[in-house]
Amino acid sequence: MNKVLIIVGDATETLDTMYPYYRLQEAGFEPVVAAPEKRRYQMVLHEIKPGWTITKEWEGYTIEADVAFSEIDPTEYLGIFFSGGRAPEYIRYDEDLVRVTKHFFAEKKPIASVCHGVEIPAYADCVQGRRMATVPKCKFDLEVCGGTFVDAACVIDDNLVSGRTFHDHGAYIGPWIRLLEEAAQQTSKKSTSSLVR
């Protein structure tokens, strides 16, 4: 089992999605893009431009979803990544996404989140007592749902790894991939021991 979910929707942040997508491949995992429907999605670029006090957004690349949330059997996946951008604000209400999210937290599988990605586990009632990094404007979403905001490039809380924005990818993606590698080794050992019996 080497498949890892990447959660997206329209207005998913381009760098937040493509950086982990290719890093997973580089590490020998199969990234599986999941969205509300199995179709092509428009990603965006988010940045606070000089002289601006809020985020400016413009179109980035598109990405094809491999699977719809309703089709996901979470037991088939090693880990999950909650991408940023504006998508989480809208897709977090999807009942199947909530179901899938709860599975990864309950089973303590490797989870990563960046920027607005926190809005999904927060809505799914999975951040109670957890420490996470996120973009400062999502601090409220995290704290009102019982989590603790940490302003750092990489926050590791057991199986949960998080960063604030795409500027932090180099800090938190590596530790998350190491958790995936450990989980893959454990899964492999369990499979081998069941065959021996």
Image (cartoon, grey):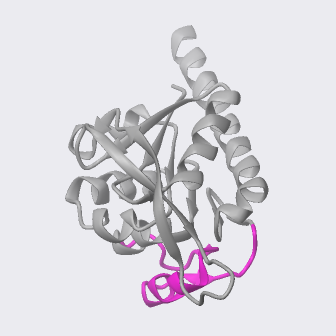
Q: Residue at x 61, y 44 (%)?
A: 20
Measuring from the top left, give residue 37's x and y in whole percent: 22, 44
Which residue reaches farthest right? 171
Indicate the position of residue 73 as horizontal and vertical percent values: 31, 37
Q: Is residue 73 in the magenta section?
A: no
- Given residues 181 and 10, the one toward you in this image is 10
Q: Which residues are magenta?
A: 125-153
Q: Is residue 26 left or right of residue 48?
A: right
Residue 127 drawn in magenta:
yes
Look at 44% across and 90% down and name the residue there.
144
Closest to the observer: 89 or 178?
89
Q: Is residue 138 above or below residue 66?
A: below
157 horizontally vs 67: left or right:
right
Image: 135 above or below 15:
below
Above/below status of 82 relative to 133 = above
Where, by quadrant of the figure, is residue 33 drawn? top left
Quadrant of residue 148 in the image? bottom right
* Residue found farthest to the front: 51
